[in-house]
Amino acid sequence: MKSFNYIVKINLSVNPYQRLMILNLALLFAIIFGVSYILSFFRLPYYLEIIIFGITVAVISILANRFINRRRGFQVNLTTPDGKRLTPEEKRVLKQRLIQDLENERLSATPELLKNEEFLKRQLILASLYLEDHEYSKAKRLIEDIEGYVIATKDEELIDLLKGIKSYLTSLY
């Protein structure tokens, strides 16, 4: 097994739930005043106004969620131990190398290999590179496969990396 010495940092600029909540609240108040102002011109029964208002709020909330998820990206900063950042081309080469190495190692996967922190770190890095390239299903499948093993290692760095990836995945789905 090759030694793997990269430092991984995941950058999510704003907590997605906090950003979503602020936008939804602002839209909700705007919609409340706008829709009630517009509906005041029509002589509609109250139950009809409530139904129209509810549908409007639901549609705007769904559109806001999609807009936020589309705008936000997953950025992985890979640095070598000497502090040099990897370029996008170097990340692509690293991703291909990781895929090839992990496929070869999975064929001979033993319980000891699955408990190896170096092996798990490489899989988490590969999952984060999948997310950066918008390959969400591959990342989700990889995370589901190794989640239990990562937690069993009790390594804080690996668990933090796993939590960052999982929080991003849950914000998408």
Image (cartoon, rainbow, N blue to C red):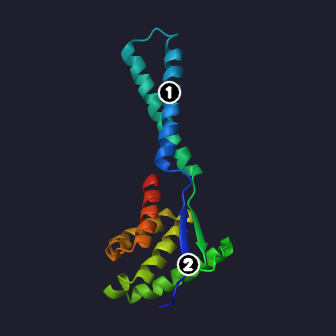
* SS type, badge 2: loop
Percent across and percent down for residue 25 are: 48, 33
Give the residue type at disc 2.
Tyr
Percent across and percent down for residue 61 are: 48, 37
Q: Of circles 2 and 1, which is in front?
A: 2
The residue to which callout 2 is attached is: 6
Q: Are marks 2 and 1 in contact (CB under 8 Å)?
A: no
Q: In the shown orientation, is residue 103 left or right of residue 13?
A: left
- Image height of 138 relative to 18, above or below: below
Q: Is residue 139 visible?
A: yes
- Seen at 53% across and 16% down, the residue is 38
Q: How far separated are the C-alphas under marks 2 and 1?
A: 46 Å
Q: In the shown orientation, is residue 166 left or right of residue 131?
A: left
Number of the label disc, if any, that sits on residue 14:
none
Say few, some or many: other residues with alpha carbon within 10 Å of mark 1 (under 14 / 14 to 19 / 20 or more). Answer: few
- Image height of 78 relative to 48, above or below: below
- Image height of 89 relative to 134, above or below: below
Give the residue type at disc 1.
Phe
Q: Quadrant of residue 34?
A: top right
Q: In the shown orientation, is residue 86 left or right of residue 128?
A: right
> In the current view of this chain or complex, which residue is farthest to the top?
43
Number of the label disc, if any, that sits on residue 29:
1
Q: Quadrant of residue 93?
A: bottom right
